[in-house]
Image: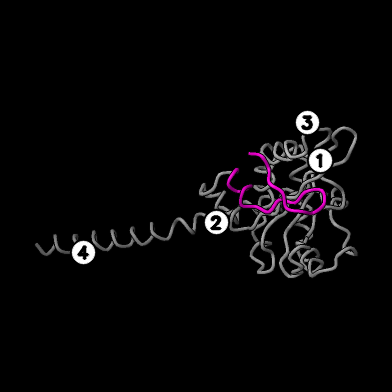
Amino acid sequence: MIGFKIIAKYVVLITVLSLSTCASKPGEIRDNAQESREKALLEKREDGAVEKYADLLVDPERYTSSGRVYHEKYRKYLIAIGAELVEDKSLKVSKGSIGFYFDRKSDSRDRLYLGIDLEMGISTSERYQDAAASYADTTLKQVMETVNTCISVFREKNIVGMVIGFKWVRSGNEEHVNIWIVEDDVILFERGKLTLQEVIVRATVTGMTGAIIRLPL
């Protein structure tokens, strides 16, 4: 009986420890996975990417906000983002576009979005909104995945999300759209709590004049 009681105590102890470990794992696994993603992205781009893709970054002299501080602090992260999108995802990143932006409509220069513009080539869509929706539907997911890999950037209190711009030519005219996404929605998307369409609906989408528009989904 004594031996049985001792064994039983150990079983209870092991069960309790197992339950407490399981309870803490989801967050730990998620954090570890994110850390690993970021580390892999940075390590993969230590082979000359700095010089090769430096021209994709915003010119620091253009900043009129605190974005310059974060630009200098996370310069290697920005270059890694550009390199991954170009080399691994075969996207064309606009020169001088990767950096930190603020929403001029809110005039809050302390709420910054990590931004990037992509050149999509010539559109065959008959309407501007259809072209914009098509690019968001086919490309936004992979861009969000790459940008959100840099979790150290989004741990900064003033970095509140990302803004993805798409540029294209339709009927000989240059057009563009910007999609402003808060970081909380990106996290929910990665966890499967939001669909891509829901992310787009919840995002602030600005058109050619800077006015808010809705995309047909």
In the rendered image, residue 118, in percent from the top left (x then y), is placed at 79, 44
Measured in 3D between alpha carbons, the distance from the residue under mark 1 to the one under mark 3, in whole angstroms, is 23 Å
Query: Is the residue under label 3 in contact with that under label 4 (CB below 8 Å)?
Result: no
Residue that label 1 marks:
92
Q: Residue at x 14, y 63 (%)?
A: 5
Measured in 3D between alpha carbons, the distance from the residue under mark 2 to the one under mark 1, in whole angstroms, is 30 Å
For label 3, the SS is loop
Q: Given the image, on which type of amino acid does mark 3 rest? A: Glu
Residue that label 2 marks:
32
Measured in 3D between alpha carbons, the distance from the residue under mark 3 to the one under mark 2, in whole angstroms, is 45 Å
Query: Which circle's residue, 3 or 2, is located before the other in the chain?
Result: 2
Q: Nearer the viewer, mark 1 or mark 4?
A: 1
Query: Which circle's residue, 1 or 3, is located before the other in the chain?
Result: 1
Q: Residue at x 58, y 46 (%)?
A: 198
Residue 155, quarter of the rendered image: bottom right
Query: Which circle's residue, 4 or 3, is located before the other in the chain?
Result: 4
The range drawn in magenta is: 197-217
